[in-house]
Image (spheres, rainbow, N blue to C red):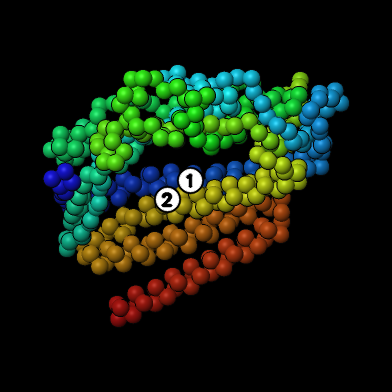
Amino acid sequence: MANQPYKVVTKQNYGNRMMGSIKGVLIGLILFIAAFPVLWINEGYAVRVYKGLEEGAGSVVAADLNSLAPEMEGQFVHGIGETSTPEILVDSELGVSIGAIHLVRQVEMYQWKEIATTETVEKVGGTEETTTTYTYEPVWSSSLIQSSSFKDPEARTRNANPAQMPYQGQSWSVQLVMIGAYTLSPGLIGQISANQPIDYTNPDLANIPEPILEKAAISKNQIYIGNPGTPQIGDVRISHQYAVPGQVSVLGRVMNGQIGPFRTEQNTTIEILRPGMHSAEEMIEAAKAANVLRTWIFRVLGFFLFFIGLNTILKPLATVGVVLPFLGRLLSSGIGLIAGLIAIILTFVVIAIAWIFYRPLLAIALLVLAGVFTYFLIVRKKKMNQQAAAVEV
């Protein structure tokens, strides 16, 4: 059977589990320590980006991009215009050519993929038995899946994948993009998305080589090598997307006829391109929103570094109780709760200290929240001590 399950059972005795948890303390300590600079640097960077955007909002100049203006040299400008490029991008291997800013070739091959599901059972005495079940399913993948590394020795032959991809994903970009009379910096060019599909039935865009035509099914937006109706392992589907020149809005500094990064007094840069017509105010507000989102992502990352680090550091305490599975689960839950509360407190405190010189009111609010969680933690610890004392009696 092509998808026959293959099971691997591993066991860890109490001593090995304890040694593993003790060794993990070092990793937990590294994660715990790493949380401090992650949160601190993140808050400082968020402040600098915000102040830099405020600086930009106060100094931006509206520019007519249709002609070079000497008075705009060195200025932070906002402009709207049509992009253009004299260059032609060519995928010679597949016969595609187009006057575009970016051209991206996407290649996927139908292959077997190994799926692993794990079930762990704890037994009296501290032994942990883990059963991992491997199954094999066909999927479309843009990268080669090495069937030689499958866990099931028989699957390496039974579910064998081709040894290589017949074609590779690839991308091409032009060097010169104009917006009116100005050129765009590489940073601005990179913000233009390739999201328009190539029409392979258009002879002006695609002249697919005969050897490929002989073995491929060509539709409007896809080259399929194989039988589209009944996909087989090794079938390949190819598509191209391109970035068409069009109307965009830009924010950047003019230097030598090029619009590029504007460096603020906060040592941050503003270099923004958006498709369509957008005012400078809209673009700066969108950049502020993106800064807030990025800041929260790193705040959550910092919290999880604290939480995982503390949980790993305290894991030996939970492992002590695994001789009785219910006791081990109880200790693990308690340690997880304590680690979570401490992680929240430390996250609030680090953020508050980082902001204290920038926004004192926010810092005070965060410290109050940290105090509330600390109080909750102390109260809970007292209740746990009381319950433990009651059990002893």
Which disc number belongs to residue 309?
2
**Residue indicated by mark 1:** 33
Spatial distance from mark 1 to mark 2, Cα to Cα? 8 Å
Vertical side of 107 occupied by 229: above or below? below
Number of numbered callouts drawn = 2
First in sequence, mark 1 or 2: give its number: 1
Q: Residues within 10 Å of mark 2 (few under 14, many from 20)?
A: many
Q: Residue at x 37, y 65 (%)?
A: 334
Expressed as whole percent of the image width and height from the top left, the position of residue 376 reads 51, 70
Amino acid type of disc 2? Gly
Can you give x and y, in whole percent of width and height, for residue 77 in the image? Answer: 78, 34
Left of 248 or right of it: where is 378?
left
Indicate the amino acid at tag 1.
Ile
Picture quadrant of residue 184:
top right
Give the image location of residue 389, x and y in percent: 35, 77
Q: Nearer the viewer, residue 326 or 278?
A: 278
